[in-house]
Amino acid sequence: MIPTHVTLVEVGPRDGLQNEKSPVDTATKIELVHLLQAAGLREIEVTSYVSPKWVPQMADNAAVMAGVRRRPGVRYSVLTPNLKGFEAAIADPAIQPDEIVVFAAATEAFSQRNINCSIEESIERFRPVVAAAHAQGIKVRSAISCAVECPYQGEVSPDEVERVVLLMKAIGVDHCGVADTIGVGTPRRVQAAMERALKHFPLAEVSGHFHDTYGQALPNVYACLEMGIHTFDASVAGLGGCPYAKGATGNVGTEDVLFMLNGLGIETGIDIDKLIDAAAFISGVLGRKPVSRSGNALLAKRMRAEATA
Ligand code: HMG
Ligand code: MG
């Protein structure tokens, strides 16, 4: 039985905009978050407290957090790679996140390229972050990159994924996110990786994060639904990518996942028309069409309707 309810974690403002070549201004990022929450998204990954030398696109993290008019019932999360990032994220209690994300990799090469340390070192960096977050009542999500394949090391085995799942569990993270960073996973391979997360975390605390480089993200979401998994990251207009995973395209489009879930009669609480407002807004600012197929189709349909009205 596939789930009756699904939670979509909107990662567009973070995963989406971290990879944009031209700078996106702070006001646009804030407006995007406002449109996403108006559409019914209840979990939004807003920004990253990472080094601005590594990812300049997220340098305005505090200004974005300060500008967001928070809605009750919405959980706002940020990426924190180390204690320095966590301390910056909570420095002003008025703008502190509800949730943080610590992110490791299933391969040594990606760990070095993305966060400049080994897997073990990254876990040791996260350990005090998890403890400090919990002391403040802040939930900790983890993300495991390259859970199917690594752009530098090639194929990744489920054993390699499980190793990091266990390391994350040992430091007490609340949630285990499994990421196909370069979007090459196909359903059975993704299921094999997800199984390893499900061995150690409850169903409600396992999620999928699928980039759509090879058009496999939607079948991978469906394959996870078959396993009962009901939390997925998705990105409005299919924005995204990781600056340290060259050639990888955006996350699965939130509109694509929502269109499928709506067709399956699965509740999400998200209004697709309002989601298209968000997709239209950010696509307009970026000067290109959404990458998501449903986003594009629904936007084109809206424009045809407006032209004949
Ligand atoms: P490092 O250079 O090894 O850090 O970077 P360091 O501790 O040696 O410090 C060097 C400088 O960075 C110092 O400044 C620190 O203060 C500063 P300086 O003295 O030179 O002026 N620094 C910081 N500044 C701001 N915020 C911080 C911070 N930490 C140190 N938190 C570090 C190590 C982890 C910081 C760096 O590698 C980094 O920021 N990496 C982030 C890369 C990133 O954001 N990648 C994209 C997000 S992950 C992703 O997209 C994958 C995901 O979507 C899942 C999937 O698809 O796979 C989640
Ligand atoms: Mg990603």
Image (cartoon, rainbow, N blue to C red):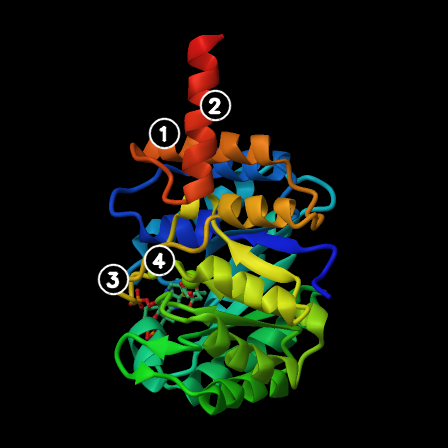
Please report whichever mark, 4 or 3, sits nearer to the chain's N-terminal start: 4
Q: Classify mark 3: residues with Cα within 10 Å, few (<14), some (14-19) or many (20+).
A: few
Does the Cβ of the disc 4 residue fall within 8 Å of ligand 2?
yes
Q: Is residue 307 visible?
A: yes
Does the Cβ of the disc 1 residue fall within 8 Å of ligand 2?
no
As rendered, which of 193 and 116 lies closer to the eye?
193
Please report whichever mark, 2 or 3, sits nearer to the chain's N-terminal start: 3
Q: Which residue is mark 1?
A: 284
Q: Quadrant of residue 204?
A: bottom right
Please report whichever mark, 1 or 3, sits nearer to the chain's N-terminal start: 3
Q: CA distance from mark 4 to mark 1?
A: 19 Å
Q: In this rendering, would 60 be left or right of 287?
A: right
Q: CA distance from mark 2 to mark 1?
A: 14 Å
Residue 163, percent across and down? Answer: 51, 90
Q: Which residue is mark 2?
A: 302
Q: Classify mark 1: residues with Cα within 10 Å, few (<14), some (14-19) or many (20+).
A: few
Please report whichever mark, 4 or 1, sits nearer to the chain's N-terminal start: 4
Does the Cβ of the disc 3 residue fall within 8 Å of ligand 1?
no
Q: Say which residue appears at 50% left-offset and 65% top-offset.
A: 220
Q: Which residue is mark 3?
A: 247
Q: Say which residue appears at 48% left-offset and 80% top-offset.
A: 125
Residue 254, percent across and down? Answer: 51, 47
Instruction: Indicate which label's residue lies in the foreground, 2 or 3.
Output: 2
Name which residue type carries label 1.
Answer: Gly
Q: CA distance from mark 2 to mark 3?
A: 31 Å
Q: Which residue is mark 4?
A: 241
Instruction: Indicate which label's residue lies in the foreground, 2 or 1.
Output: 2
Q: Quadrant location of the N terminus?
A: bottom right
Q: Classify mark 2: residues with Cα within 10 Å, few (<14), some (14-19) or many (20+).
A: few
Name which residue type carries label 4.
Answer: Gly
